[in-house]
Amino acid sequence: MNFIRFTDLCAQGRVQGQRVFIRADLNVPQDDEGHITEDTRIRASVPCIRMALEAGAAVMVTSHLGRPTEGEFHPQDTLAPVAQRLGELLGQSAPHGVRLVSDWLDGVQVAPGQVVLLENCRIHKGEKKNDPELAQRMAKLCDIFVHDAFGTAHRAEASTYGIAQFAPIACAGPLLAAEMDAISRALSHPKRPLVAIVAGSKVSTKLTILKSLADKVDQLIVGGGIANTFMLAAGLPIGKSLAEPDLLDAAREVMALMKARGAAVPIPVDVVTAKTFKADAPAQIKAAAAVADDDLILDIGPQTADLLAAQLRGAGTIVWNGPVGVFEFPAFENGTRTLAHAIADSDAFSIAGGGDTLAAIAKYGIEQKVGYISTGGGAFLEVLEGKTLPAFEILQQRAVS
């Protein structure tokens, strides 16, 4: 992908004395009292902010937080806790962290070498609908717009898309650039074989992803409820397992697309079942053809896991979205654990995304062995669907304008 990188602008000395507007993703979880419970997104945004400060820019940062009503401001919508934590991380914690600016659309006072946090951008009317007047007001605040929030890259909003249209320079921050590079490497120019793991409860929520990947990948591994539907489509019994019988034709279509390309959707040869969906439910390993009417399939079996792990170890590129079983329950985690370690052991370039996938990566301690861990849930899924994200589109346009 062709786009302007903020790192290049800094290296070229083009940021000194400039007003830099950074759209970050600081949408962190909070408890009922407004205390931040997990600050990964704030910590991930610090390198871009620090880079701008060290380059001598006057830095403005904004983000959405929660789901505020446009045109209204309520105490729970404030970025004040974020400002305090950001100040601590930047070494500017006294007395109240980074300065928070509430009314900022008509102008912001910030000097080179300083940073301010602009209050929740989603409280402005027209933000979500990408109102051009609002976007132009934002663009007038800056000389350089930096998009560094991949989690919002699938939305065309005033602070993510419109401002990039009108700002003198629009570029990708280091977080967004890394996502763009990783996605391009995995899907546009993959080292073969390209293997994708797509798992989840329903085929319906990921049908477009499955169809899109069926045209690209050499192996399409399905898991969870999706695998149950594919097993049913292949004529295997699934008992009372979660599945979508009305989508059997769609599953068969995906399998046919793969077969026509000389590829495959591996169907489990064995599974792990239980009679109830409980962590302490007795687990039983069964051949895929031997599932009883009252069985729940909660994981792939060890033979299937080993077969799939061997394919992953021989892959050139791996895309991973979703655990293949109920990995939260110890008796039903073997499949996900086996595939996770196979990905970690593989020489392939791997990219992983989705909340449950990230939870599995953390559980098995393989963060340092996955090529790239995507920070965007919905954005990552839309990329897998084959969509061009609005953020990618506008930054590529601005790179040649």
Image (tube, rainbow, N blue to C red):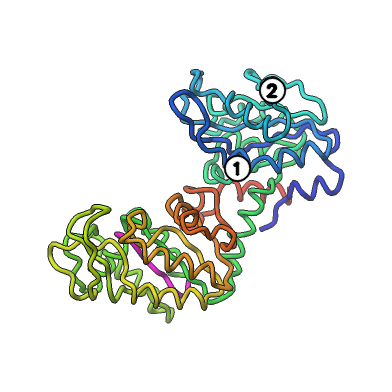
Q: Quadrant of residue 39?
A: top right
Q: Which residue is mark 1?
A: 149
Quadrant into which the N terminus falls = bottom right
- Write the start and end of the magenta stretch as one range: 217-225
Query: Which of 67/214 is in front?
Result: 67
- Identify the residue at horizontal 48%, vertical 70% (top origin): 342
Residue 304 lies, with reference to residue 123, above or below; the image says below
C-alpha span from label 2 to label 1: 21 Å
Query: Which of 363/193 is in front?
Result: 363
Residue 151 lies, with reference to residue 119, above or below; the image says below
Residue 124 lies, with reference to residue 3, above or below; the image says above
Tell me where residue 315 appears, x and y as whole percent. Answer: 52, 75
Decide if residue 396 is on the left or right side of residue 230.
right
Type of amino acid at the residue the image marks with label 1:
Ala
Q: Which residue is mark 2?
A: 99
Type of amino acid at the residue the image marks with label 2:
Arg
- Identify the residue at horizontal 74%, vertical 39% (top origin): 50
SS assignment at label 2:
strand
Decide if residue 280 is on the left or right side of residue 336.
left
- Identify the residue at horizontal 48%, vertical 53% (top origin): 358
Tell me where residue 98 appears, x and y as whole percent. Answer: 69, 26
SS assignment at label 1:
loop
- Magenta stretch containing residue 311, yes or no? no
